[in-house]
Image: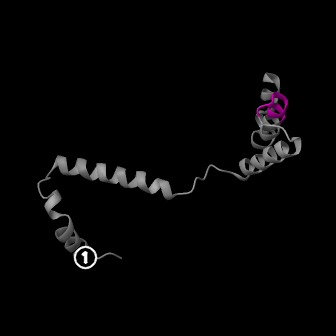
Amino acid sequence: MVKKYNIRHHYETHHAERYRGLQGQPRREKVKELIAGFKKQQSVFISRPDISAADVKSSYLIANDIALASKPYCEGEIVKTCILKAAAIVYSEKLKFLLILA
């Protein structure tokens, strides 16, 4: 638990000169700006929750298929099979639509 005195002392010794002139609305805007910058910096260190096990598994399957084929990924047939395998894992419910497009 941070004590009120400690916060005030830190502000007065380290930040008072920089922010002393800000009062009222400009002060609120500066606080919002600083919070937004802090959240932007913090987002760099937070792991991405949208990377799922299915994404990782499909990535390994694609790498395995490329290694087994001993061909570059730019060949059309290997690209198509890799995309269909990845789609089968990641988007199993939308696979029918992808097969129609392929």
**Is 44 above or below relative to 4?**
above
Residue lying furthest top: 101
Q: Position of residue 38 (x, y in %)?
A: 37, 55
Q: Give me the residue at 78% from left, 27% from top.
A: 97
Which quadrant holds residue 81? top right
The residue at which mark 1 appears reads as: 6
Q: Is residue 101 left or right of 48 when viewed as pictured?
A: right
Residue lying furthest left: 21
Q: Position of residue 19 (x, y in %)?
A: 17, 57
Q: Position of residue 41 (x, y in %)?
A: 42, 54
Q: Check if residue 15 falls in the magenta segment.
A: no
Q: Main secondary structure of the magenta part?
A: helix
Q: How many marks?
A: 1
**Amino acid type indicated by mark 1:** Asn
* Label 1 Cα crowd, 10 Å radius (few <14 / some 14-19 / many 20+): few
The region drawn magenta spans: 74-81
Q: Is residue 7 left or right of 16 when viewed as pictured?
A: right
Q: Give me the residue at 84% from left, 38% from top.
A: 71
Q: Position of residue 56 (x, y in %)?
A: 73, 51
For the N terminus, which image quadrant? bottom left
Q: Is residue 66 left or right of 31 when viewed as pictured?
A: right
